[in-house]
């Protein structure tokens, strides 16, 4: 059996797909499992042993969907089509994911219709529909039960997954055991907290824990704020300066005493690593 899961959304969304992938692997151990995610999200799936192949689509805003980006999507769809998938699951609820699922030519093509009815065109492109009411559930449940209605899975959801054996060490923190990971940054303006409040939190944590690791994504604003926290704490903190990959951050999170952050991919990864 060949299974294709399509979710070209954000990094955290890709990680939230892992319980579904884990369950599909457990239920169908001989299946070949491919996943399509947005470029830049593939690293977060490196810790999911259930996946055989990860393909990437250009970010939706790539040159405002230039002809080059559209051509890349077409090549991606044709590559999927050559695999002759038995099932394709469209889990982004967007037209781009629907096009990829449609062009994949999978024998069974599933979309969720609980968010709103599909128009006549899209209904002709799919032959399996999930009515799971995902607006009333967690995003993990949305993916899981959308798939479950077309491909029976166990009723108990597995946890979010980043396997410990797939983590990597970050050399500056090698051997550290008693530390907190603080991740104050996010590219979403509405989720940002004033830096002075993060300073207060970091100073309070430094009274209990001997070391703080200030995690930051590659965004220049995140790197700048992490550097400022490192400066204020003067020797009690070290910034990752936006240079960690997901496997390295997961390695830190498995060992951390505590994670403090905002609603972003790093928070979901902390949940996957069972970090308090």
Image: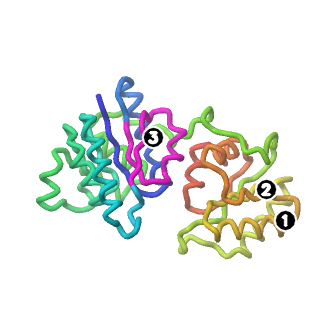
Which one is nearer the viewer's eye here, 220 or 189? 220
Which one is nearer the viewer's eye here, 218 or 49? 218
Percent x, y of residue 153: 34, 34
Residue 86's quadrant in the figure? top left
Q: Secondary structure at mark 1?
A: helix
What numbered label is drawn on residue 233? Answer: 1
Q: Secondary structure at mark 2?
A: strand
What numbered label is drawn on residue 19? Answer: 3
The residue furthest right is 235
Disc 2 target residue: 212
Q: Secondary structure at mark 3?
A: helix
On whether residue 56 falls in the magenta region, the answer is: yes
Q: Residues within 10 Å of mark 2 (few under 14, many from 20)?
A: many
Percent x, y of residue 146: 30, 46
Q: Which residues are magenta?
A: 34-57
Q: Residues within 10 Å of mark 1 (few under 14, many from 20)?
A: some
On whether residue 19 falls in the magenta region, the answer is: no
For image coordinates 81% across by 46% down, the residue present is 178
Q: Earlier in the sequence, mark 2 or mark 1?
A: 2
For image coordinates 23% across by 55% down, the residue present is 113
Q: Earlier in the sequence, mark 1 or mark 3?
A: 3
For image coordinates 79% across by 48% down, the residue present is 172
Q: From what the image shows, is residue 97 above or below residue 60?
A: above
Q: CA distance from mark 2 to mark 3?
A: 30 Å
Does 16 sit left or right of 229 as displayed?
left
Q: From what the image shows, is residue 28 above or below residue 264?
A: above
The residue furthest top is 30
Does 221 sit left or right of 8 as displayed?
right
Instruction: Confirm or deny contact between disc 2 and disc 3 (CB under 8 A).
Output: no
For image coordinates 38% across by 46% down, the residue present is 36
Instruction: Confirm or deny contact between disc 2 and disc 1 (CB under 8 A).
Output: yes
Does 21 sit left or right of 191 as displayed?
left
């Amino acid at each position: 059996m060949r299974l294709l899961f399509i979710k070209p959304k954000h990094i955290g969304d890709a990680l939230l797909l892992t319980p579904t992938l884990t369950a599909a692997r457990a239920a169908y151990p001989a299946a070949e499992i491919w996943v399509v995610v947005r470029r830049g999200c593939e690293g977060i799936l490196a810790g999911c042993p259930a996946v055989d192949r990860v393909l990437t689509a250009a970010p939706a805003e790539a040159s405002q969907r230039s002809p080059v980006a559209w051509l890349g999507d077409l090549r991606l769809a044709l590559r999927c089509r050559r695999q002759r998938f038995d099932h394709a699951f469209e889990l982004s609820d967007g037209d781009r994911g629907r096009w990829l699922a449609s062009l994949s030519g999978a024998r069974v093509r599933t979309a969720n219709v609980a968010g709103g009815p599909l128009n006549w065109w899209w209904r002709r492109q799919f032959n399996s529909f999930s009515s799971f009411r995902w607006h009333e559930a967690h995003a993990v449940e949305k993916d899981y039960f959308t798939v479950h209605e077309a491909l029976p899975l166990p009723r108990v959801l597995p946890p979010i997954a980043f396997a410990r054996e797939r983590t990597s060490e970050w050399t500056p923190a090698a051997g550290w055991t008693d530390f907190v990971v603080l991740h104050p940054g996010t590219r979403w303006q509405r989720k940002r907290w004033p830096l002075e409040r993060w300073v207060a939190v970091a100073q309070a944590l430094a009274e209990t824990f001997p070391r703080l690791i200030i995690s930051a994504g590659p965004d220049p604003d995140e790197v700048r704020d992490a550097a400022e926290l490192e400066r204020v704490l003067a020797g009690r903190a070290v910034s990752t300066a936006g240079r960690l990959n997901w496997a390295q951050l997961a390695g830190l999170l498995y060992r951390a005493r505590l994670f403090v952050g905002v609603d972003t991919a790093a928070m979901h990864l902390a949940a996957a690593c069972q970090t308090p």
